[in-house]
Amino acid sequence: MIFSVQPTFLHDTRQLSLLPGRLTWSRPNGKEVVWEKEEIESYRYKVEGIRGYAFWICRKYIIEICNHKQEVVRIQLWSLYGLRRQVKYIAIIQTLNARYFNDMAVHYIQLLGNDLSFALWGVGLSPDGIADAKLGEIPWQRLGIKPYAQYFALYDLTDQINYRAFEYGIDWNAGILQAVVEYATNRHMAFQSRQYE
């Protein structure tokens, strides 16, 4: 899928090409960034805004994509009064997930399905639950997950005051961690309900 990206009306339009095996981004200096799918490692996204008296005046939609060399492509879309840019922002994130990052989430889910333990961004995941420096060990049946617009939180259902937040705009691949944890908790809940039938 190819997107025409014009950060503001003062900037030239640039092309973002999200093809199944390759990402291409045209930089302002005329040079193109071309990454193969295997080079793409992580992403993060956020919305920043300037608030007026009663509503948002301006929003900046930011998507950053990082490769294995720690090079970052930064895509920005500015919007006055929320017009048109949010739809493109969501479409770019959905295409990134479908083309590059869903496979990564599936890989981690398969590891859990094969009863293997691993760590994702500081959280240890195992067939029994999670292990985190802040939260300690929490089995899947006691793990709560709460998604918000800018972040999601993991917490123990018996101690909801203590939680750990992962921000989509700060923590690389927070969306992948969320998808893996949600899948694992839903799978465990479905398994538990079948046992009691």
Image: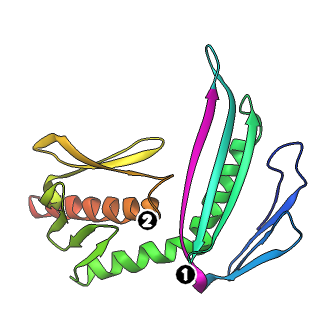
Q: Does 176 appear above or below 148?
A: below
Spatial CA distance of label 1 from label 2 is: 17 Å
Q: Which mark is residue 187?
A: none
Left or right relative to 153: residue 151 = right
Circle 1 or circle 2, nearest the eye: 1
Q: Does 196 appear above or below 127?
A: above
Query: For mark 2, what is the residue?
Result: 176
Location of residue 139 by image quarter = bottom left
Query: For mark 1, what is the residue?
Result: 68
Q: Position of residue 97 (x, y in %)?
A: 57, 66
| Magenta span contains residue 35 | no
In the current view of this chain or complex, which residue is farthest to the front?
A: 29
Q: Position of residue 6 (x, y in %)?
A: 83, 51
| Amino acid type for the residue under numbered disc 1 | His
Please say which color scheme the image uses.
rainbow
| Amino acid type for the residue under numbered disc 2 | Ile
Magenta highlight range: 38-50
Q: Position of residue 178 (x, y in %)?
A: 38, 59
Location of residue 186 by image quarter = bottom left
| Magenta span contains residue 48 | yes
N-term mark: 1 or 2: 1
Query: Of residues 24 and 179, which is closer to you in this image?
Result: 24
Quadrant location, the C terminus: bottom left
Q: Secondary structure at mark 2?
A: helix
